[in-house]
Image (cartoon, grey):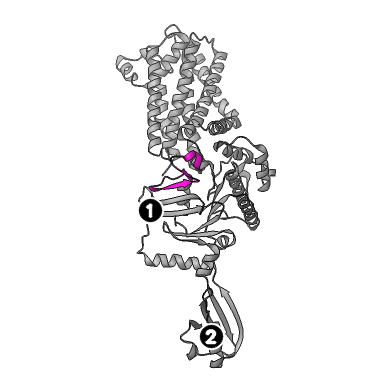
């Protein structure tokens, strides 16, 4: 293993975030605060508790998931798309380093950034509501697994995209609707039976539900089902990445 | 012959069907400076890209100091440094960080003293904390060279190193190449500036249309293909080439004042004595004499032209 190469890629990617620290952290903090003001205080005070949890509290896990999903994807996809775009990818391709090592550097850095942002959001949320975490280990596991899986997914998008349009299209057209319809702001039990069934095909439902369970012990689906679904998603991403690798992963002619 | 890079039957067909390399065989000797000379689109960059691992070969093999560049890519690539043709750098990094980054990619341990000396040699030390986007084109080229040398490679590829580079940098660069050669580094450079190849290369390979037309020691090449011309200025213009000279390779300029005799400088008999005798017999008065040697440029243009004429057009 070329650990030194993994380290320098990881560090360079992290430095990119540190250099734009304000931008990296301000945007999730501000948007989370706005969600709390609008949903938590203004509208939330008129909504009754959901499954015994006040609405302000109820949306914390969903909001966190919303942000880390989008951040993981955009961080990881930009991380690998940019070297392709400006040509510096030649360095990665001609260095004595395997595809897997490059992947560890890029995906590792993107997942770390998302994880930090997730923690910052939880801290911000605790300023607005009285946050209690029933199962901290589960909570951390869900958070970390989600950061890794979706960073990997972002990496795939970054490899696949050969234009800025393609880079943006998946996050906008696929991820945002899935997250908003995935029970981030409501329990899917509130939906009519037909739409409840449809929702079960939305992978984000399992992430949000499992994550929420680790806070309040309330969930839409069984927590083990949620955990299995994350692993299924992670496995899918790994399979796609290894297939891309075998066929030259759109980097090499 | 002790070759450090050995290329066998290397071909590359791109996805769009364009065949960039057609069965290249090439032995690059340890410690030499080899110039790959060829027109645009000849396959120079593709050849370098295949050796360095950026592009996969369609068939054939490359070994670098005994290591197959696909099977043992780590050992092979560790020996190589590459300066690409385009000024590809990430805009917001600093000079220092980007050089350290490359060294790290090659798995070399941190050695700030070495990198400091490297940047000083390339006149980059006072720019080390500048962001790359703030640098001029010439400075960026220096940064690319510093990156390529950051892990002290044994083989250095320079793809069009002097494209868009001013005189001073060019001089610095030749100086650096000299120093590298003294320390035993093998250097392969591509260029279409022929005087460049003429100045610094030990051997010259001419590549056109994906094939190596010729590879030869530079001085031998110059001798072998170098034709000399004897230019004779006449005191009085002549109407035609004198009748006793028509069997020789002599031509007369339009205004009738200059006779040009082309001969092979490496031949045993150049025919100059005979020509001068015949000239005095013909009664022409000479004003001045001079000889010129054809440059590598003439040789090169000649070769590529002949090659294109022989083959049916395969433009894509």
Q: To which chain does the residue with label 2 belong?
A: B
Q: Are marks 2 and 1 on the same chain?
A: yes
Task: Give the CA distance from mark 2 to mark 1.
Answer: 49 Å
Asked whether B125 falls inside the magenta stretch, the response is: no
Relative image position of residue A187 (x, y in whole percent): 40, 14
Judged left or right of residue A27, residue B312 is left
Q: Which residues are magenta?
A: B52-76
* Residue nearest the observer in this picture, B309 or A56: B309
* Image-quadrant location for residue A18: top right
* Image-quadrant location for residue B119: top right
Asked whether B67 falls inside the magenta stretch, the response is: yes
Relative image position of residue B232 (x, y in whole percent): 57, 83
For marks 2 and 1, give the one nearer the viewer: 2
Judging by the rendered image, the residue that carries numbered circle 2 is B275
Instruction: State the mark number for residue B223.
Output: none
Q: Residue at x 64, y 56 (%)?
A: B171
Badge 1: residue crowd in 10 Å (few <14, some 14–19, many ≥20): some
Q: To which chain does the residue with label 1 belong?
A: B
Q: Are marks 2 and 1 in contact (CB under 8 Å)?
A: no
Judged left or right of residue B287, residue A187 is left
The number of callouts visible is 2
> For numbered disc 2, what is the local secondary structure?
helix
Q: Quadrant of the C terminus of chain B?
A: bottom left
Q: Can residue B77 be seen in the rendering of this structure?
A: yes
Q: Is residue B94 above or below residue A209?
A: below
Judging by the rendered image, the residue that carries numbered circle 1 is B19
- Direction top: furthest residue: A52
Q: Can residue A182 be seen in the rendering of this structure?
A: no
Q: Is residue B71 above or below residue A60?
A: below
Q: Is residue B215 above or below residue B235?
A: above
Badge 2: residue crowd in 10 Å (few <14, some 14–19, many ≥20): some
- Direction left: furthest residue: A194
């Amino acid at each position: 293993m070329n650990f030194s190469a993994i380290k320098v890629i990881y560090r360079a990617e992290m430095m990119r975030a540190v250099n734009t620290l304000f931008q990296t952290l301000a945007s999730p903090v501000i948007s989370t605060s706005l969600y709390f003001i609008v949903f938590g205080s203004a509208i939330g005070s008129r909504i009754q508790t959901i499954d015994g949890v006040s609405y302000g509290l109820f949306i914390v896990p969903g909001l966190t998931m919303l942000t880390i999903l989008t951040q993981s994807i955009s961080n990881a996809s930009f991380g690998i798309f940019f070297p392709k775009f400006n040509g510096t990818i030649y360095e990665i391709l001609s260095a004595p380093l395997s595809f897997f090592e490059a992947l560890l550097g890029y995906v590792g850095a993107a997942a770390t950034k998302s994880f930090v942002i997730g923690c910052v959001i939880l801290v911000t949320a605790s300023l607005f509501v009285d946050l209690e975490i029933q199962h901290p280990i589960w909570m951390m596991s869900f958070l970390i697994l989600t950061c890794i899986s979706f960073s990997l997914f972002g990496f795939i998008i970054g490899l696949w995209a050969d234009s800025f349009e393609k880079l943006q299209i998946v996050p906008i057209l696929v991820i945002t609707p899935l997250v908003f319809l995935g029970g981030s702001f409501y329990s899917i039990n509130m939906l009519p039976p037909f739409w409840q069934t449809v929702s079960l095909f939305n992978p984000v439902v399992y992430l949000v539900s499992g994550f929420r369970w680790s806070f309040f012990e309330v969930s839409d689906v069984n927590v083990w089902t949620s955990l299995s679904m994350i692993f299924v998603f992670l496995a899918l991403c790994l399979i796609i990445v290894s297939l891309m690798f075998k066929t030259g992963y759109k980097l090499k002619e | 012959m002790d070759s450090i890079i050995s290329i066998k039957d290397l071909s590359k067909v791109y996805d769009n069907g364009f065949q960039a390399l057609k069965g290249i065989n090439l032995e690059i000797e340890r410690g030499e400076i080899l110039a790959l000379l060829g027109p645009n689109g000849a396959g120079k960059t593709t050849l370098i890209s295949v050796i360095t691992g950026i592009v996969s070969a369609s068939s054939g093999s490359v070994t670098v100091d005994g290591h197959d560049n696909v099977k043992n890519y780590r050992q092979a690539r560790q020996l190589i440094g590459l300066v690409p043709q385009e000024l590809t750098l990430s805009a917001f990094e600093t000079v220092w960080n980007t050089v350290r980054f490359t060294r790290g990619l090659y798995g070399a341990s941190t050695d700030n003293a070495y990198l400091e000396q490297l940047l000083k040699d390339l006149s980059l030390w006072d720019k080390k904390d500048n962001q790359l986007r703030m640098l001029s084109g010439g400075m960026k080229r220096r940064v690319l060279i510093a990156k390529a040398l950051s892990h002290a490679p044994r083989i250095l590829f320079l793809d069009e190193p002097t494209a868009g580079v001013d005189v001073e940098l060019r001089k610095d660069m030749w100086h650096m190449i000299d120093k590298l050669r003294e320390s035993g580094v093998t250097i392969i450079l591509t260029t279409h500036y022929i005087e460049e190849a003429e100045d610094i290369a030990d051997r010259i390979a001419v590549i056109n249309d994906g094939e190596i037309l010729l590879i030869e020691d530079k001085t031998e090449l110059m001798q072998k293909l170098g034709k000399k011309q004897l230019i004779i200025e006449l005191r009085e213009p002549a109407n035609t080439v004198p009748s006793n000279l028509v069997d020789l390779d002599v031509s007369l300029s339009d205004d009738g004042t200059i006779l040009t005799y082309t001969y092979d400088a490496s031949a045993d008999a150049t025919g100059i004595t005979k020509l001068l005798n015949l000239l005095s017999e013909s009664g022409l008065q000479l004003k001045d004499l001079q000889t010129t040697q054809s440059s590598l440029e003439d040789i090169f243009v000649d070769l590529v032209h002949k090659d294109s004429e022989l083959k049916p057009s395969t433009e894509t």
